[in-house]
Every structure is written in structure tokens, then in C-alpha cells.
Image (cartoon, rainbow, N blue to C red):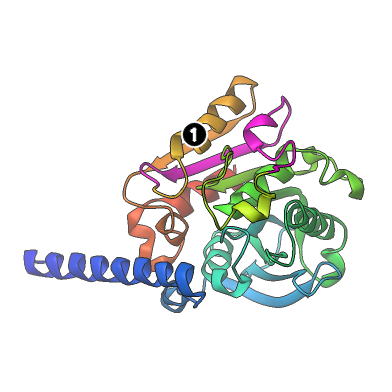
Amino acid sequence: MTFADSNTTERSRRSLLACAVTASVLTTLSGCSGLDLVNAASVAGAGERRLGLAYGVHARHQLDAYMPSGTAPKAGWPTVLFFYGGTWRRGERAEYRFVGEALASRGILTLVADYRLYPEVRWPSFLEDGAVAVNWVLRHSASQGLPVDTSRLHLMGHSAGAYNAAMLALDPRWLAPHGVEPNRIAGWIGLAGPYDFLPLRDQDAQPVFHHPNYPPNTQPIDLVRPGSPRAFLAASVEDKLVSTQRSTVSLARKLQAVQVPTTLKLYDRVDHITLVGALSRPLRWMAPVLDDVAGFILV
């Protein structure tokens, strides 16, 4: 590659990144599908896709399944149940096809779940939805032809979705009504999650958590206990939306202090949004998020 070619490639990468960030900002402001870019540019690495599987009774109790290509192991594929972000007010599972295809390309069966959002519901209904989804994966996914290794189920989320994953992994009360203990979860992955955020200053999130009358025990940082599922926590070095130090770093240190195996990764070329975008093929040059997450799951 000549020096000129290298410059051209770098300009193309920067242009694509600028488009992705702009589109994501437009998503936040207008509700349009700003993740179409990374979905369209991703090359499918999955095998079969199963879309719109119902895991519960509500209209938004649906998930999309992305299966690795090839023959499943006898015990089934290691599996991720992914929850997207959006301040618990917005998001659609179809926007995160790139997550499903990225992980499936590494041999991980991936389920991208919708859940109820504000103003239809407030805290804790979306956590109850997540628990219903976990129970469905453990007890009913096989009847839908999904070769899930239920001993290797991982929860994963970005931003608000990382909060959901954290609460399900750290707080037994959500899975208990289904007769499921958190130790049935092999591990959980949080990307740029808010784990310690009261009092809320984000006006979008305030009504979700009943501001100013916050219910007790809403903060993952307060729910750390020995024996919790192992964790992979990642964030941008300088996240302008969620405090990396207060949330990701502090939670990682607290988990490590009680001997919970915890991996902490901070990336310096991504922001709050492109952290999850780096799972997609066109943005993987920004940070090795896919390699690191897959390595955590497949250990």
C-alpha cells in the first residue's frame, strides 16, 4: 500500500465514523434508525436467523436469534442474551442486527431482545421483562429449535441495556419468581452501563425511575455480593454520557474486592455510542471490543 493509499483509507474510515456518529445522534434526537449504516455495512457472519420469537405475553416480548454457521456442538452453542440501550425510552431489536451477526460469527448464539419502554412502563417492569426472557432461554428455547447451551448463557447490554443485564446478574429478586438463581448465568457483559447514577440529572431518565421518589435498591453498585456471575465491564476512557469512573471502574473494583472474576476494559478511540458500534465490521478498527467480548464468553 502506498502512502497515498493509506491516507485514502484513513479518510474513508474517518468519513464512515463521522456518518455513524451523526446517524446515532439523529437516532437519539428524532427516533430514526441511525444504526442502519452499520447494519447495512456489516457482512453477515451468522448462519440461520430466526426473527420475532415470542418469549412472553406482551407485544414487545420478542427477540431475534442469530445462530453460528455449521453444526452445533452436542451441548449447544454458548449463548448471549443482548439488551440494547436508549434511556429505557427507545430502541428496536432490528437495529442491533450487527451485534447478533458479529457474535454469531465467533460461534456464539445471540438473542437480541425487545423489552417494554417508557412511557408504557417504568422501573422495574423492564427488569421483569428481562427475567422473563432469561427464563424463556433456559426453559423454552430448545422447543423453538435453538441449540442453546444453557450452562453457558451470558447476559449482555449496552448503556441502559447494560444496566438491565447488571441488575439481573447482581440482584436475585428479578429471577427468583421464575425459580432461577443468578448463578445460572455464566457471566455478564456491560458496555458503557450506568451502575451508579442517583440523583438523576438526565430528564429523559428521571420519570423512568419515579423521580424524585426513587425506589430503593435501584443501583447495581449497591448490590454487589460474593458469588455473583463473573463480569466483563467495558467503557470509553472519556464517556460524555455515562461516567466511566463512577460507573464502570467503580463497579469493577467493587466486584473484584469480593472476589468476583471481573475483566475491566477501557478503550480510548471510541465514545459512548461507537463502543457498541465497534462490534460491527466497518468500525472494528476503532477498538477490539468483539475480540475481547468473544474471548470472555468462550474461555
User: Which residue is pictured at 60% across the width and 20% down the height?
Assistant: 257
Residue on which disc 1 sits: 246
Dominant secondary structure (helix, strand or loop) of the stretch shown in magenta: loop
How far across and how far down the image is residue 70, in percent?
63, 69
Q: Quadrant of the N terminus?
A: bottom left
Task: State the residue lying farthest toward the left.
Answer: 3
Along the viewing direction, whichever of 119 and 20 lies nearer the viewer: 119
How many neighbours does mark 1 have within 10 angstroms: few (below 14), some (14-19), or many (20 or more)?
Answer: some
- 83 in the magenta segment: no
Question: Compared to 145, does 155 lie above or below?
Answer: above
Task: State the residue lying farthest toward the front.
Answer: 212
Give the magenta-colored segment's residue range: 213-239
User: Which residue is pictured at 59% across the width and 67% down the height?
Assistant: 90
Q: Quadrant of the C terminus?
A: top right
Residue 35, can we see it?
Answer: no
Q: Amino acid at mark 1?
A: Arg
> On the image, which quarter does residue 283 sit in?
bottom left
User: Which residue is pictured at 72% across the width and 58% down the height?
Assistant: 73
How far across and how far down the image is residue 262, in percent?
57, 32
Question: Compared to 222, does 110 lie above or below?
Answer: below
> On the image, which quarter does residue 278 sit in?
bottom left
Residue 59, can we see it?
Answer: yes
How far across and how far down the image is residue 98, in percent?
51, 69
Question: Compared to 257, does 191 lie above or below?
Answer: below
- 216 in the magenta segment: yes
On the rendered structure, is 285 left or right of 290?
Answer: left
On the rendered structure, is 156 left or right of 38?
Answer: right
**Count of marks, rendered view:** 1
SS for callout 1: helix
Along the viewing direction, whichever of 294 and 190 lies nearer the viewer: 190
